[in-house]
Amino acid sequence: MAHRTAEAVASLRLFDHHESALVNAGLAALARHAPDDAATLRVLVARLAKLNEMVSDIPSLRAKQRLAGDDRNQNTLIEHLTDIDGLGGDLVLPFKATMSRTFLLAKIQFLCGIVKAIKAIECGADPELTPLAHQLREELAQSIYTQLAEELLLALLRKPNISKPIKRRAADQLITVWDNVELEIDDFCPLLESAWHARNNVTSRLGCLLGTTEYFRLVSEDCAPQFLDFFARDEVSRQEQQAFEEFLFNMTYEELQALGQAMRQEGRDSITPEYAAEVLGRDIEELDHSGEIDPMELYRSYYRRQLAADFRIMAGTEGPRRTAEAYLMVWLLNQQ
């Protein structure tokens, strides 16, 4: 049964070559130690295959179509995407885009399931599964980073302060991603993957809120130098610096301001995550958990910063109008 599942995974191209090998190894281990979990996950693989087949049957978003007397092609789609304001959400996206995004979410949920199942048997049944659990978590992270990159490009489309040429390039990149469910972030934006992977391995201890420790931890985790150099260049704007500080500390600009004010009022030279949690009234996520990344926490970090940036635009308040990743993405699109 495990062998047939492996063939199905390979032939349907639900995963890339490396992912397929890991998924098959995981299913085989579960078949030995937790057959019920293995059976449940095989059902999920079959459902992923059906979803993939549906996406593959939909014509390319770049193909010419005609509906209600209107000619549709990639140029009209790009124009449509550059005019969205974000209030319509996924309702304004083309059908194939919605299905492609659904497939990616379903794939992430499957990978979450297999990681959880392998982790459950890792210590008690087979300690040798530890490297497999680690590698599967890394593949889960890559899929989540791909989802984040999509969300980042969509965020640029709805920003009022982004130029039309940049929005057109962002829309064109999204069409490429939606047209091919096999694409992952390393295929179209390895620079962001490097930054997110490095940040996912760093837990901020806050300290004096200077960010020096966090910065050098990013360097030690092989964060792409181009990412760090972008925010260290001579002409960096104040809002870009503020967005980078948000990225370093995993907090919004407003939260960092509140912590700075609390430090001054109490005469503190440094603070801890526990103190920050007390001041801010929320848990401070640790993106690194003893060598095991938690990509879901990074996802939450990005969304917190993105929502805060959108609010500042609407309210006209002080602080960065984009996330650090968005500032970098605009620069990258401008280079095309």
Image (cartoon, rainbow, N blue to C red):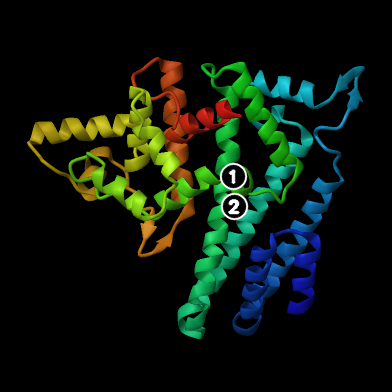
Residue at (24% x, 44% y) in the render = 212
Is residue 86 visible in this depiction of the protein?
A: no
* In this picture, residue 103 sits left or right of residue 250: right
SS at badge 2: helix
Residue at (69% x, 24% y) in the render = 81
Residue at (72% x, 38% y) in the render = 176
* In this picture, residue 164 sits left or right of residue 297: right
63, above or below 135, in the image: above
265, above or below 295, in the image: above
SS at badge 1: helix
> Mark 2 — residue?
143
Query: Residue 320: x, y in percent?
Result: 39, 25
Query: Residue 44: x, y in percent?
Result: 71, 62
Q: Amino acid at mark 1?
A: Gln
Q: Amino acid at mark 2?
A: Ser
* In this picture, residue 223 sits left or right of residue 133: left
Of residues 228 and 179, which is closer to you in this image? 228
Query: Residue 48: x, y in percent?
Result: 74, 57
Q: Quadrant of the C terminus?
A: top right
> Mark 1 — residue?
147
Q: Quadrant of the N terminus?
A: bottom right
**The quadrant where residue 58 appears:** top right
108, above or below 178, in the image: below
Mark 1 Cα-neighbour bin, 10 Å: few <14, some 14–19, many ≥20: some
Q: Are marks 1 and 2 in contact (CB under 8 Å)?
A: yes
